[in-house]
Amino acid sequence: MPGLRVFTLLSVFAGVLGPPLVAGDRPQWGERHTRNMVSPERGLPETFDPKTGANVRWTARLGSDTHSTPVVADGRIYLGTNNRVPRDPRHDGDRGVMLCLDERSGALLWQLVVPKITTSKFWDWPFMGICSPATVDDGLVYLVTNRGEVACLDPRGMANGNQGPFVDEARHQTAAGQETVPVAPTDADILWLFDMVGSLKVRQHDSAHASILAHGAFLYVNTSNGVGDTHREIESPEAPSLIVLERATGRLVAVDDERIGPRIFHCTWSSPSLLRENGRETVVFGGGDGVVYGFEPLADAPPPGEVRKLRKLWQYDGDPKGPKSQVHRFTTNRRESPSNIKGLPVIHGGRVHVALGGDLWWGKNEAWLKAFEPPAPGGAPREVWSYPLVQHVMSSPVIHEGLVFIADTGRRLHCLDAATGAGIWTHDVKSESWATPLVADGKVYFATRRGEFLTFAASREKRLLAEVSLGAGVSATPVAANGTLYVATMTHLYAISAR
């Protein structure tokens, strides 16, 4: 019975190799729309060793400061970094860089190279690079550069020619006052560009950070509007915090009308999510004033030349006692200050989960993770639970099978009950964490600014499965795609696989 023998052999091999892999791309930060950093991948290793190469498929050299999280789509990896290790001698000096790497080998396919803003270092911090993760949707790449530009890129780069309508890549990749650098096959092909700084007078601070939400025919983008050089004033109080672009053309079609600007304590670094509940959709956005806003998505585009105001459906203030006016009186006050939101609001089980609290550099130490239910039409959000963190929080929450995982800068990883917000276990580490944990294959992968990489069982019982020293700090969140775990340190990208 040959068929039975073949079936038996396949069953044996399956038992040896373990559960089948769930092959899938990770084309944006977190799950599509909900922003939950959970992956269905299976068969991922508990650990790896950068020194011996155990479980490391390949390693790619990055710059010196990498704050962007990898995105994997259609055989390519997109990752922002700086130009401290130039990959092309034509592009010299401090630049923002978005790398496009081959998923199989880590080899460079092309790169977007963006000169720095030179107004002052507080606009575009030295060697910060491109901090924003890309969003790949419908075969195109969307991202925000270090210059506050929303860019739409051809995933094939210049290898297939300059597709347009934007055709001035040579000038765009050349610093002001320098001789133009001609384009080459390893350069990016920009399809369209929208300059938030030039068009909307956005005053970004330190850097731009945005994970673009693609929904329907539109892109929802936080602007990174923030304080000036002294950290005690908002130079562009009228600039919007959330904008909407037409994805086909890059045309501005809507802005928020909440006048958040004067209440921004530091900057606007949280990106929007999409809530779907009871047949309704809501764009959920964490403002630089520490308030979560719910906006009605656009149903259609306005006529050319018209820019609409986004319709606010509700707002949720997780720190109602925090100051809401003349907020910069509290700059450097570690006991009393407004709150802000750095991570993304995460949607799960009909609830919005958001981490907020005092600013890491300038505000109070107090911070929380909150869960609230969005209201019915005409109602107000209802807070379900509040969990105190050790101090300032940069991470987003991750929700999986009744558990919530989040890290804070108080050198601690927390595991909570998703229904009640009650603490279940914590784990102390040697340094603060900016990255969000990743839950995949029954494990929690977690990294710190000191380069500790820890793997836990994703369970109510605390079980540390492995601990690795990466030799460089980590700001980026680990990502799993197509049977591989990707870990970006400040200086290297590791592709990790047990097979």
Image (cartoon, rainbow, N blue to C red):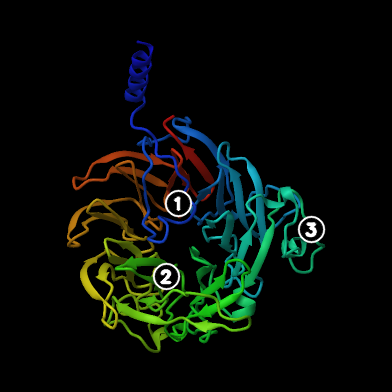
- 3 vs 1, front mark: 3
Task: Residue at 30%, 78% (x, y): give it.
Answer: 317
- 2 vs 1, front mark: 1
Q: Residue furthest right?
A: 179
Q: Earlier in the sequence, mark 3 or mark 1?
A: 3
What residue is pinned by disc 3?
Answer: 181
* Nearer the observer, 450 or 101: 101
Task: Residue at 35%, 13% (x, y): give it.
Answer: 5
Q: In the structure shown, which secondary structural element does the residue marked by tag 1 occupy? A: loop
> How far, Cα to Cα, is label 2 from label 1?
18 Å
Circle 2: residue type: Trp
Work out which quarter of the rendered image holds the C terminus and state it.
top left
Circle 3: residue type: Val
Quarter of the figure with residue 34: bottom left
Question: In the drawing, does residue 58 fall left or right of residue 384?
Answer: right
What residue is pinned by disc 1?
Answer: 474
Q: Residue furthest top?
A: 1
What residue is pinned by disc 2?
Answer: 361
> How far, Cα to Cα, is label 3 from label 1?
32 Å
Circle 1: residue type: Val
Disc 3 crowd rating (10 Å Cα; few below 14, some 14-19, many 20+) is some
Does residue 9 appear in this view? yes
Question: In the drawing, does residue 419 fall left or right of residue 4?
Answer: left
> How far, Cα to Cα, is label 3 from label 2?
38 Å
Q: Position of residue 173 (x, y in %)?
A: 72, 61
